[in-house]
Image (tube, coloured by chain):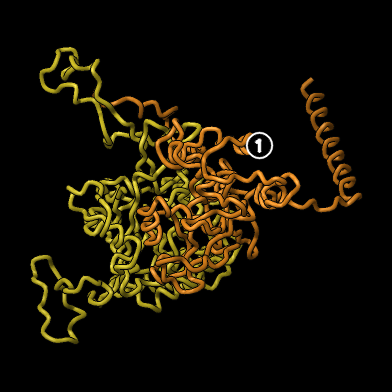
Chain colours: A yellow, B orange
Amino acid sequence: MTPNETPPACPAQEQQAECLVPPASADPAASAPKTTRRDFLKAGGTLSLSSLMGAGALMAQSDDAHAAAEWAEHFQKNYRLMTDAEKAEARVRLERRYSQEYGKPVTVDTTGPQPGVLMGYALNIRKCIGCRRCVHACVEENNQSRGKRPGEKIEWIQVLRMERGKFEQGKMDHGYPEGLGIQVGGNAYTPAGQVLEGQYHYNPEKVPEQDATYMPIACMQCEKPPCVKVCPVRTTYREADGPVVIDYNWCIGCRMCMGACPYWARRINLTNPVLPKEEMNPVTHYLGNRPRMRGVVEKCHWCLQRTRHDRYPACVEVCPVGARKFGNLLDPESEVSKILERKNVFRLKAELNTFPKFFYFYD
Amino acid sequence: MKKIAIYTVILALCGGTLYAVSAADKAVEPAPAAAPKEPVVCFESRKGASDINQQEIKPGLPNVKCSPTTGAALWYGDPYHGTVPMGKMPQMDIPEGKAVVVPRSEKLALMPMCGTACHNGVGPQFNPPTLPKSRKPAPVPTMEAMVPDLKDLQHGRGRIWCMDCHHTTQRNKLVDHYGDPVSFDQPQLLCGKCHGDKLRDWRDGIHGKRIGEFTSTGKKRWFTCTECHNPHNVQDGARNRGFVQLQPEPSPQLPKGMKDAKHELLHPIAH
């Protein structure tokens, strides 16, 4: 079809496969055009493809699970378009590969969203003491790269230390521009109260410090996520139960999402991830904490491998002050629903209309 | 000259290898008994007061992983390890077995002594009995030596005293409104006497900490008041929250080429 030709309309059900009208449903698996990538390749070059497939069949039979998996992954569809059979196939392939690679039985979960669940998160910003335990619990759970060299250490949660500013008598004559007295701005230019101008690399002997407040930041799992809007290969998307996830196999590493995210939540594997065998968490989810490869973006997914089976995320479980709360927003009895009902709640950068499902609150 | 040097190096290497082999043989001969591994102890919220022993619950799966830097619990393999049912709590309708706690009594170092040695009320030193007859504060040098925080008890700003929380005659129990004993495993029944708003939030899961299943009907391990807060030390000049200070976990990796994080201390707006 040339670009000038208009796509044919869809008169009958059986012609659906040729129809190029965009799907009405938001669920691409339900309404995607039936022309698959594989069909296209078949039509394009039967000869070269058949030779490739032959080689693939040979390689798939080899005992090297890694090579077979690599090969099969080249022909794998976007996770949202995969049928249940294809998902099961991918799961078996990955489990075999990871088990061989890490020397222990690894499970790759493909559990989908549970009906009636919309995950939500709340964080008591007055409680946080800045101990960074959530940061490191997340690394224990989610198989991030933990090497020593630059770019090899990835952490999804950032804890921001913010100082408490104050107004001072001695600065009454100071103003802005500096040295010219009060012309544009006055003493009130001193950062006072909580400003988003903090330190990530603070390292005192003991926390909490008296002159500081702490603000942990991770993926906010927005209802209108800017990262999803910009992804050119549509590999990152919002799951039906809330979290924004990434199909790592389809990520091309362009980092558009990292630029789009207003919460600095996304990380890229610039190098081959460094994940020692003994530290690897063998309970994984396909869209969650399975080991990533070089050149893909990753981020917090609210521990899908846990939360899809009703368990709290890892960061919630280790917070020594109980500042972190997680629950089902659709259940009025859940912890998060009660917080929204009763406490003073705000969303970070609410003015951007990203509608995060991560809420900050205070007593 | 160079050749000699090379031969020397090779000789030295051979010698080293031989020595290593013989040393290995020696080590094998006496067959050293596999020394029992030092149990790894990490703490949950309060260092020294909420310790947890690391154990293997399944091959390769520890009940808890600890931070190598600070010794803090970082990851729970089994959130219900070592728990018992919480028991009936007023105004909490949780089905039996859905709410569990880790008993604290066995972790309290002075607990076994309190009720037997001095404070059983019948020992010879209590003849005549010296148990306080009123709830008026009186300095007790022995106790102050054992628990230094008592010298200047900040809880209640000097308005409350030991006997407001500890039972008069059963010293390894706490006390409720009516003077009835309360177990050390259920301090919420005591703390809620004054901190009713916090108790209400705790009951609803807004205050405090639970681990396990997040659904409102799921099984959870509840953390009780004293697992996070030290009632003897609630105020301290060097902090501004109701928790003791802790060593933080290591800071994130610096960006490539950056030697330190001093740039973070510079404000973009001069002041």
Residue B153: % across, % down:
50, 36
Q: Image point 10% across, 18% down: which residue?
A: A183
Q: In the rendered image, which residue does mark 1 sit on?
A: B142
> What amino acid is at disc 1?
Thr
Q: Is residue A43 above or below residue B233?
A: below
Is A96 in front, or is A218? A218
Q: Image point 51% across, 37% down: which residue?
A: B247
Is B162 in front, or is A278? B162
Q: Is residue A270 left or right of residue B164?
A: left
Query: Can you see residue B74?
Result: yes
Q: Is residue A54 above or below residue A98?
A: below
**Quadrant in the rendering for residue A34:** bottom left
Is B124 in front, or is A222? B124
Q: Residues within 10 Å of mark 1 (few under 14, many from 20)?
A: few
Q: Image point 39% across, 63% down: which residue?
A: A287
What kind of element bears circle 1?
Answer: helix
**Quadrant in the rendering for residue B22:** top right
Q: Is residue A246 left or right of residue B247?
A: left
**Quadrant in the rendering for residue B151:** top right
Q: Is residue A300 above or below residue A171?
A: below
Query: Can you see residue A98?
Result: no
Residue A172: % across, % down:
19, 17
Q: Is residue A334 above or below residue B170?
A: below
Residue B132: % across, % down:
59, 44
Q: Is residue B258 left or right of residue A262?
A: right
Subunit ID for the residue under disc 1: B
